[in-house]
Amino acid sequence: MAQPTGIHARRAALRLLDAVLRQGETLDIAFNGATRDIRKFEDKALARAIASEVLRWLVDLDALIDSATKKPLPHDAKARMVLRMMLAQWLRLDTPPHAVLATGLDLLAGGQRRLAHGVFSTLTKRGDTLPDAPTLPEPVAMRWGERAPAIAAGLAEPPPLDLTLRDPADTAQWAVQLSADSLMPGHLRLPRGANVEKLPGFGEGAWWVQDIAASLPARLLGPGEGRHVLDLCAAPGGKTLQLAAQGWQVTALDISKRRLDLLKANLKRTGLKAGAVRADALKWEPKHAFDAILLDAPCTATGTARRHPDVLHRIGPQTIEQMAQLQAALLQRAQGWLKPGGTLVYATCSLERAEGEDQAGAVSLTPDPITRDGLPQGVEPGSAGWLRTDPGMLEEHGGLDGFFIARWRRDL
């Protein structure tokens, strides 16, 4: 019997969800293995979309499933996982119920197949829907506090595609050519779903993909004018490209060969120059001090939940504490590599206080408060001169990632 069209994408989505929810892997790491037998770009994208929507709406999907069963299914039951996928396709990806059944039930056999058919049919006949915003897992909502409802609203949709331009003076020109919006000079925003490598300007290196929030730390260092900057934990290189384009002489340090290879490929594509160094920042010693240092530290990445909803389910107190200890050690080292009068910018793409405000409060340099200058309209620094963004901001424009950013100077 011929298999229904799209079954390979559904099987890949099931493998992705198993890797994230049972094995604790990230979506990005699990993706290549889960889609290894799929050739079409569209099918790979569908597998990722199904898995992402399940992770984004997991709490609400489970509530629907539980409302249609006499006894709750085990959390890790295959029937529950497949039902999550079926409901995500129907309620989030606008797949007709008959097509959902045709591809979903083939992932199950026997009693599980009959159970899934019955639950899905019950929910479709009732016309059930999802809330306007996903319900956050309770531990996550508690950590994010009073901003949790606004952040959840910002997670309801996958993010648009943000580009950073090599030359901000070309913003208007590229906005027209790519039919894009712009929230600040040097930034473009396109609808999600584009094949990036086929867009005008990719081959000539006129821009690179980078969320608008991720572009702010390098912007806060301003023009380089030939001075030396250290980009710590630099790969895959978006901030390195920015700094080079802003006129800095960049030393880009990272421990990962694979990620440094991506950075070098991006430098080649854009024609920008930087010195790439593979080393452990906790052991490396520079040959000279720097005029500026950008430490975009390794973190839990909970601020990227719009595109990586796996962080809602993988990240807990232990991981946060481990990351916070690493960040503190990196900050301590970075402070000693700064020239008198030099600037340090610290950033994490995390929504956790332990990785942001708590780290900044322990730095012994002189604060250099961030101001409104150079920030997108609607993004404001806090009273301490630190900047905190989250997915609940700029919602009318498509939102942005969650970041914490702080800046200091070493006294002369």
Image: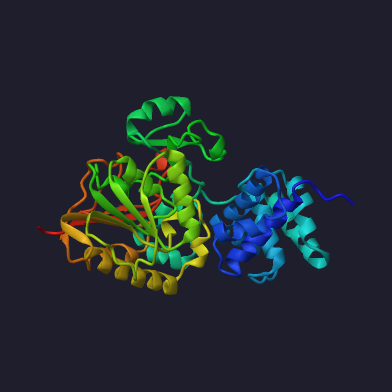
The answer to which image quadrant residue 337 occupies is bottom left
- Above or below residue 349? Residue 359 is below
What count of labels does the image hold? 0
Tell me if 78 is positioned left or right of 396 in this view.
right
* Residue found at the far right of this picture: 1
The answer to which image quadrant residue 114 occupies is bottom right
Tell me if 65 is positioned left or right of 191 in this view.
right
Residue 5 in picture, x, y percent from top left: 78, 46
Tell me what residue is drawn at x 49 percent, y 36 percent.
202
Pick whichever, 89 or 115, lies toward us.
89
The answer to which image quadrant residue 206 occupies is top left
Tell me what residue is drawn at x 61 percent, y 56 percent.
31
Tell me if 163 is positioned left or right of 192 in this view.
left
Colouring convention used in this rendered image of the protein: rainbow
Q: Is residue 133 visible?
A: yes
Tell me if 304 is positioned left or right of 297 in this view.
right
Pick whichever, 34 or 290, lies toward us.
290
Tell me what residue is drawn at x 52 percent, y 57 percent.
309
Q: Is residue 194 visible?
A: no
* Residue found at the far front of this picture: 287
The quadrant of the image that shows the C terminus is bottom left
Pick whichever, 134 or 214, lies toward us.
214
Residue 71 in picture, x, y percent from top left: 69, 71
Tell me what residue is drawn at x 29 percent, y 47 percent.
249
Residue 179 in picture, x, y percent from top left: 47, 28
Residue 357 in picture, x, y percent from top left: 27, 63
* Residue found at the far bottom of this picture: 318
